[in-house]
Amino acid sequence: MLENIKVLCHSSIVFEKEKIIYIDPFKIQDNLSKADIIFITHDHYDHYSEEDIQKIRKEDTIIVIPESLKNQVIKFGFNFNSIIIVKPNEKYIIDGLAFETIPAYNINKKFHPKNNNWVGYLLKIDNVSYYIAGDTDITEENRQVKCDVAFVPIGGTYTMDYKEGAELINIIKPKIAVPIHYGSIVGTKEDAIEFSKLINEGIKSVILMK
C-alpha cells in the first residue's frame, strides 16, 4: 500500500503512481518528478510554499486548495481552469481521482480555527484509501474516517502530539499508520518512534521520514 509513496519533509508527501500527486510540498529538492496534481491543506508557509510548488509545477498541473487560498493561487499564476477550490465534508472527482475533504482544525489551540475551512484529504488510489489529516487535533469529524492508510501529524504545538496521534489511529483503525509533521519545525524522530509504540496490535506503524 505504500509502494511509490514518500514522505519528503515535514508534511510533504508524494505519490508516484499512475499520477504524480503531491501533498503540501515543502523543502522540495530540484530533481523530483513534476506534479499532475498538488493538494494543499491550508495557508501556512510550511504547507503552501510557492517556492516549492514552482519546482514541481508544469503547464497542466492541477492544484487543489481551500477557498482561503484562491486569490493567492491566481496571483501566483495558475490558470483558473487548473484550480480546484474545495470545502470541508465534500466529495470530488478530478481527472478520475476520487477524494473527500475532512475538516482539519484545532480543538484547544488557536493556530487552525475551524471557521477557516481548512482540510485534510481522503484519497482513493488503486482501490486503497489514504487519509492525509492536515494540521488538526482529534475532532468529531476525523474520528469517523475510514481508511486503509492514515498519515497523521505528531509534532505537537500546532497539531496533535505523538500521544494524540496514536489515540486517533487507535480510534479509526487503519491498516497502516504513518506519522508526519515532525523533524523540521516541531517534533523529532523520537516522537515518531514513541508514536509507533502506542499503536494497537493489528495496525502497522511505518516511519517513512528518516
Image (cartoon, rainbow, N blue to C red):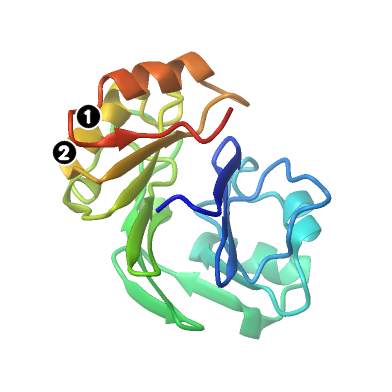
Give me the residue at 34% from left, 49% from top. 149
Give me the residue at 19% from left, 34% from top. 170
Q: Quadrant of residue 60?
A: bottom right
Q: Nearer the viewer, residue 193 or 103?
A: 193
Give me the residue at 45% from left, 50% from top. 2
Image coords of residue 39 (percent x, y): 54, 61
Q: Amino acid at mark 2?
A: Ile
**Total number of numbered discs in the rendering:** 2
Q: Is residue 86 above or below residue 140?
A: below
Crowding around mark 1 (Cα neighbors within 10 Å: few <14, some 14 to 19, many 20+) is: some
Q: Is residue 209 above or below residue 88?
A: above
Left or right, 94 with reference to 24 = left
> Contact, CB < 8 Å: mark 2 with mark 1?
yes
Image coords of residue 106 (percent x, y): 34, 37
Q: Nearer the viewer, residue 159 or 180?
A: 180
Find numbered disc 1 in the image and state the secondary structure of the residue it sits on: helix
Image coords of residue 99 (percent x, y): 38, 69
Give me the residue at 75% from left, 51% from top. 52
What is the residue that sits farthest to the right in this orientation?
30
Find numbered disc 2 in the image and state the secondary structure of the residue it sits on: helix
Residue 101 makes an appearance in the image: no
Crowding around mark 2 (Cα neighbors within 10 Å: few <14, some 14 to 19, many 20+) is: some
Image coords of residue 154 (percent x, y): 41, 28
Image quarter (top left, top right, bottom left or bottom right) of the C terminus: top right
Q: Amino acid at mark 1?
A: Glu
Residue 6 makes an appearance in the image: yes
Q: Quadrant of residue 129?
A: bottom left
Q: Which circle marks residue 167 in the picture?
A: 1
Q: Which residue in the protein does label 2 denote?
A: 171
